[in-house]
Amino acid sequence: MAATARPRIVVLGAGFAGLRAIRILSRGGQRVLWVDGRNYHTFLPLLYQVATAGLEPQAIAYPTRSFLRRRPGVDFRLARIVGGDAGARTLLTGDGEQIAYEYLLVATGGAAADFGIPGVRAHAFNLYDVEDARALRNHALELLERAAVTPDSPARRALLTFVIVGGGPTGVETAGALAEFRRHVVPSDYPSIPPEQLRIVLVEARDAVLGTFASSLQLRARRDLEHFGIEIRLGASVARVGPEGVDLAGGEHLAAGTVVWAAGIRAADVAGRLGLPTGRSGRIRVASTLEVVDHPGVFAAGDVALVEGAEGLPQVAQVAIQGGSHAAENILRAIAGRPLESFRYRDKGAMATIGRSRAIAEIGRLRLSGPLAWWAWLLLHLVMLIGFRNRLVVLIDWAWNYVTYDRGLRAIIGPDRAAGENYASWETR
């Protein structure tokens, strides 16, 4: 196929960095093409609530074209980038189309990192897209249905065991949500299953959960998790994941019907397809300006970017949001012939929720826990959601859950897929 008309700027990725960049670039009067393999933005921090039947997938997904309604200078292309020529400044889509650019921003985000551990991709679920979350929800509900008609036995106990690998915010929040599901939903929906038989095990290789928080908050989070009846295995490394559970490095086997992998993140490997220089975890090497090393006019931001000479920025939403804004502003500076400016990340704090009225927050020197931190967490995530309708739906669902102790639609809807089967987040965007 012949090359399309040359757009001035191409942005790859509809995550936090790409979304923020589009906001900036659309005000600059430039021609912009936005490319992603999905036609929606996913609000990643709430995926675990979809997986545990707290929210519906559409509540945290926002269509990219809806975002562009009042941005006439930006067009969207649903495509997967399979190659490119940095010298010729062209991209190649999976449909064989060539897309030319003068400036490029790579903001394709991250993917689940398996660290080469056998069986992770084949047998573990992860949470990087709404399809991942919906598949995990379907799987969990199917196992509960099977357990409801299975006599008490080791096989039934394995069906009711959830192993969550990774003690960061995703792992902790997923474990807490499962514990609330066990407490409030299982007794009413599955009366033949004693709630205490649903076992939740959180495995963390380090010596503390939520290791990036202050030690006092780590301890508070651990106490809250244990209060909810979650087993915590600290200093435990996974050696293998199989169809029947998890083998730990120390030799212990955890028989489980469900393994959730929340242990790490790597960059989506679009860099390799574009011939861009990479560093650790496959992240694209960029200068302090977020311009790719030795590639003028090409920028990277968010989880996919690795700033040279820096101690390392966390792969979290705030870094992506600020990086996407800065890269877009530098592109506009380059077009105007002005010097590029260095990126300086401003840490606005971190939060994690463990369950109802239990959360921790660290904002500068301020450390919060308990109900105040929990309400702050709820408010922040409502504000960060894209789209008024999504905010309203999430608010209504949260209010309903809070008042009734019930959760969202617990229906098994969608394709029946096993862990690791055709998951985009194990692959690339």
Image (tube, rainbow, N blue to C red):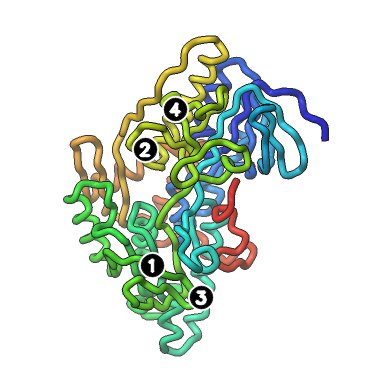
- Secondary structure under tag 4 reads loop
Residue 194 x, y percent position in the rendering = 36, 80
Q: Amino acid at mark 1?
A: Val
Amino acid type, mark 2: Leu
Tag 2 residue: 313
Residue occupying image coordinates x 54% and y 17%: 332
Distance between mark 1 and mark 4 Cα atoms: 35 Å
Residue 53 shows in this picture:
no
Give the foreground label among 3 and 4. 4
Q: Quadrant of the N terminus?
A: top right
Between marks 1 and 2, how big is the CA–CA gap? 26 Å
The residue type indicated by label 4 comes to Ala
Q: Give the SS element for disc 3.
A: loop
Q: Is residue 185 left or right of residue 69?
A: left
Upstream in sequence: badge 4 or badge 2: 4
Residue 22 lies in quadrant: top right
Q: In the image, residue 324 lies at what x, y percent? A: 48, 30
Residue in the image at 54% along x and 73% along y: 142
Q: Which mark is residue 238?
A: 1
Sooner in the amino-acid sequence: mark 3 or mark 2: 3
User: Helix, strand, or loop for circle 1?
Assistant: strand
Q: Where's residue 375, x and y in %? A: 30, 45
Q: Earlier in the sequence, mark 1 or mark 2?
A: 1
Q: Residues within 10 Å of mark 2 (few under 14, many from 20)?
A: some
Residue at point 44% right, 27% down? Answer: 287
| Residue under label 4 | 287
Q: Determine the residue positioned at 66% across, 28% down.
A: 87
Residue 292 visible in the shown view: yes
Quarter of the image that includes the C terminus: top right
Q: Amino acid at mark 3?
A: Pro
Which numbered tag is attached to residue 343?
Answer: none
Residue depth check, mark 3 versus mark 2: number of the one nearer the observer? 2
